[in-house]
């Protein structure tokens, strides 16, 4: 069944394109900049926050990430979509969640998982308060962009003009009722690590994912870690041990090895670089990666001769 809009008169062109984003779902416009995509399934609900451009022009072939993660397990799914860098700070989004709370929507599910990355990770944390006991998985989320709370993150100057001080505002406070909140980040990304440090409640797991840079979601997806992580959250089995076991897949992930090699090369750690090169050469031969494999092969060819493969 094709997705249908709840109110087509309110939709713009991007909403119309979003109409093709999956099957068996409805799409509800939440003003000009947001939409909700809902599909019923089993007793576990996955709530994701995603950007329209990623859905419509990314590698997901016009489907929401929630559809890819939830449908194989038969879960229900709800996606909040933003058209632009809104951080989901909009009264229409507040009202949407208020209505779900008033109707006891989330109470109908055995388990609820909130997920997002970056801006969407902030929203996953902030809005998880509507479903006490939910699990939260957030990749490199911002805690807030409220200038009154922090003045050290200058990356999102336009977004700082939005209201982060009112309802659903400060993400670390909003996850206090979650059963667990996994905050993943690359420690070398200083600002991401500083935001992660603000999530410090007893239900928080700060999980370091080094050498992933600012593309953490892409790396975890390519390593097939992200679906397993979401599955673990939906089964009530998300722990730090589970994440680090899954993250061992990085040892066969060419982009991770390339980043590690680059760090070792720059720091002059020749012996370690030699070991990585030997392992990376094997991965480059057998890993079914295209762009990453090409980049790694190029590194192997141009590496200085005193570190033999």
Image (cartoon, helix red, strand yellow):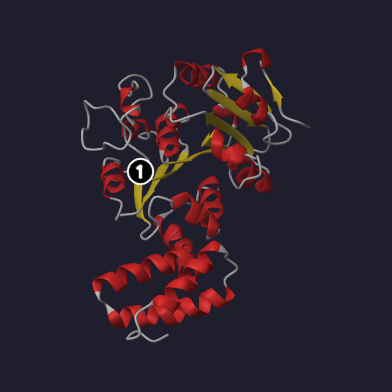
For residue 8, above or below residue 152:
above
Could you tell me if residue 44 is visible in this image? no
Residue 129 picture quarter: top left
Foreground: 43 or 299?
Answer: 299
Neighbour tally class for label 1: few under 14, some 14-19, many 20 plus, Cα within 10 Å: some
For residue 306, above or below residue 89:
below
Residue 76 picture quarter: top right
Most distant residue in the front direction: 302
Q: Is residue 59 left or right of residue 180?
A: right
Quadrant where the N terminus sits is top right
For residue 145, above or below residue 70:
above
Q: Residue at x 35, y 43 (%)?
A: 203
Q: Which residue is mark 1?
A: 203
For residue 12, above or below residue 122:
above
In the rendering, at what x and y percent does residue 174 appear?
A: 36, 30
In the rendering, at what x and y percent does residue 114 appear?
A: 49, 38
Q: Residue at x 53, y 37 (%)?
A: 48
In the rendering, at what x and y percent does residue 172 appear?
A: 32, 35
Foreground: 103 or 8?
Answer: 8
Quadrant where the C terminus sits is bottom left
Please tell me how many numbered marks the rendered image carries.
1
Most distant residue in the top direction: 9
In the rendering, at what x and y percent does residue 266 appear?
A: 27, 70
Q: Secondary structure at mark 1?
A: loop
Q: Is residue 1 left or right of residue 201?
A: right
Could you tell me if residue 117 is visible in this image? yes
Q: Residue at x 60, y 48 (%)?
A: 59
Q: Residue at x 30, y 21 (%)?
A: 165
């Amino acid at each position: 069944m094709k997705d249908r809009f709840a109110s087509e008169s309110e939709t713009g062109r991007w909403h119309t394109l979003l109409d093709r984003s999956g099957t068996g779902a409805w799409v509800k416009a939440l003003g000009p900049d947001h939409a909700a995509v809902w599909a019923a399934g089993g007793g576990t609900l996955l709530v994701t926050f995603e950007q329209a451009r990623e859905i419509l022009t990314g590698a997901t072939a016009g489907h929401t990430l929630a559809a890819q993660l939830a449908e194989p397990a038969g879960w229900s799914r709800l996606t909040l979509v933003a058209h632009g860098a809104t951080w989901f700070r909009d009264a229409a989004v507040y009202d949407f969640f208020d209505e779900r709370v008033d109707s006891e929507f989330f109470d109908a599910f055995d388990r609820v998982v909130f997920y997002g990355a970056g801006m969407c990770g902030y929203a996953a944390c902030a809005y998880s308060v509507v479903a006490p006991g939910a699990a939260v998985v957030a990749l490199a989320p911002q805690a807030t962009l409220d200038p009154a709370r922090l003045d050290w993150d200058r990356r999102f100057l336009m977004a700082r003009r939005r209201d982060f001080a009112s309802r659903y505002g400060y993400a670390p406070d909003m996850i206090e009722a979650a059963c667990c909140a996994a905050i993943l980040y690359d420690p070398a990304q200083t600002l991401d690590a500083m935001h992660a440090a603000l999530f410090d409640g007893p239900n928080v797991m700060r999980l370091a994912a080094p050498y992933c840079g600012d593309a953490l979601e892409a790396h975890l997806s390519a390593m097939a870690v992200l679906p397993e992580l979401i599955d673990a959250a939906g089964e009530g089995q998300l722990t730090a041990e589970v994440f680090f076991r899954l993250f061992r897949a990085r040892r066969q992930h060419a982009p991770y090895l390339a980043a590690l090699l680059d760090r070792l090369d720059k720091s002059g750690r020749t012996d370690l670089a030699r070991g990585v090169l030997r392992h990376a050469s094997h991965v480059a031969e057998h890993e079914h990666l295209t762009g990453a494999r090409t980049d790694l092969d190029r590194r192997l060819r141009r590496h200085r001769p005193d570190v033999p493969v």
